[in-house]
Amino acid sequence: MAWWERFGGGKDEPAAADDALGAMVAGHSIEVMPRTAAKIEDFRAILPAGTRVYIAHIDGTPIEDMVATARRLRDEGFAVMPHLPARSIESEAVLEEWLLRYREEAGVEEALLLAGGVETPRGNLDSSIQMIETGLFDKHGFRRLHVAGHPEGNKDIDPDGSTKEVDKALAWKQAFSESTDAQMAIVTQFAFDAKPVIAWTERLRQQGITLPVHVGIAGPAKLQTLIKCAMACGVGPSLKVLQRRAMDLTKLMLPYKPTEVTGELAAWRAAHPESLIEQLHIFPLGGIAASADWARVHAAPQEMAMAG
C-alpha cells in the first residue's frame, strides 16, 4: 500500500498526494548550530527566502557565537529562532542579558524555549515555564515563542513512562498563549513514524490544546547516524522504523529520507483540516545541504502552483 492510500487517499491519487506533500514541506523550518552555520558560505544559496532557522544552543556555546550567527542569518533574510535552554542559563539576570543582546544586536523577535539537556541546572531556572514566568519575553517584545513537544514521551519529565507532567505543562502553556501577545506553537522531537505523532496531536486536541504543532522530522542521513541520534535523544516507538530498515539489506546502505513519514503526515492533514499539525521542522542530521535539497525537491509542486 502506498503512503497516500493510508490516510484517506485513493489508489489513483498520486498527483493529489504530491500536492499534499508539497504543501506540507513548503514553509518548513530548519535548524543549525553556530559551528555548522560557519561552514555555509551563504544560506540564501540553499534555503528559500524567509525560512525560519532555529539556532541550536548546545551547552557551553558562547552567547557571542549564538548572537553572531543570529545576526548573520537575519542579514541574509531569514527568520531567526534561537534555542533558550533554561538549565544552561545561570540566572534571570543572564536570561535578560541574552534577550537584550538578541533583540538589540541581531533583531531577533522569536525563541524556542526548552528545559535543556543539562542534568543539573546552572542556576535557579529549570524549565521553560519558569522562563516564561519571568515576564521577560513580553517585556522585550518577543513576538513568537515556541515550546517543545514529545509525541513519544519524555522520560526526563515523566520517568514512569506516563505523560502526566508533560500534559500538565502543555495545558499551562496553552493557558499562557491566551494571555500573551506572542504567537505560540509546539515543535516536536523528530520521529520516524507518523502514527504516534498523529495519535498524540489528536489526544492534545481532545484535551483542549489548540496550539499549532510543527512536527520534527530528521532530514536525509546515513542510517547509522540516525539510530545513534535517536537513541541519544530518547526517540521511542518510531525507532522501530529504523531498526526494521537496518534489517533490510537492500536498504541498509542507502541514506534514509523522510519522504514516507512526511507523506503520511501530509495525507492526514489534507484529510483532517482540523488537525493541529501545521508544518514541518527539519533536523538536518545528515547535513543542512542534504536536508535543503530534499525539501526543495518535494516542495516544488506547491511552489510552482503558488507561482502560477
Image (cartoon, rainbow, N blue to C red):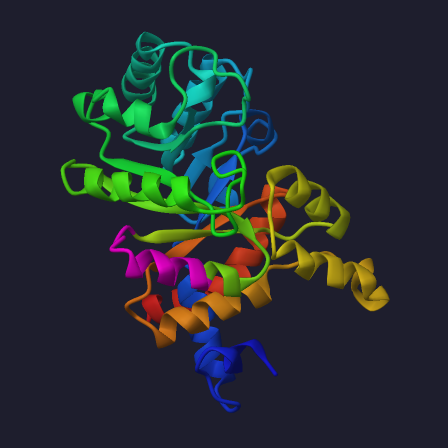
Q: Which residues are magenta?
A: 198-211
In percent of width and height, residue 183 lies at: 23, 42
Q: Is residue 110 above or below residue 297?
A: above
Q: What is the quadrant of the C terminus in the image?
A: bottom left
Identify which residue is drawn at 16% across, 35% down. 180
Q: Residue furthest bottom?
A: 12
In percent of width and height, residue 187 lies at: 41, 45
Relative horizontal placement of residue 127, taking residue 3 as reference (left or right): left
Q: Is residue 199 magenta?
A: yes
In percent of width and height, residue 257 lies at: 64, 59
Main secondary structure found in the magenta portion? helix
Corner quadrant of residue 285:
top right
Q: Is residue 297 above or below residue 168?
A: below
Corner quadrant of residue 59:
top right
Q: Residue furthest front?
A: 160
Residue 130 in view, yes or no: yes
Relative horizontal placement of residue 110, taking residue 83 as reference (left or right): left
Tell which of 110 and 234 is nearer to you.
Answer: 234
Q: Is residue 267 above or below residue 10?
A: above
In percent of width and height, residue 79 lies at: 35, 38
Q: How many marks?
A: 0
Identify which residue is drawn at 38% across, 17% down. 125
Identify which residue is drawn at 38% across, 69% down. 269
Residue 286 in view, yes or no: no
Q: What is the quadrant of the N terminus in the image?
A: bottom right
Q: Is residue 80 magenta?
A: no
Corner quadrant of residue 89:
top left
Tell which of 114 and 159 is nearer to you.
Answer: 159
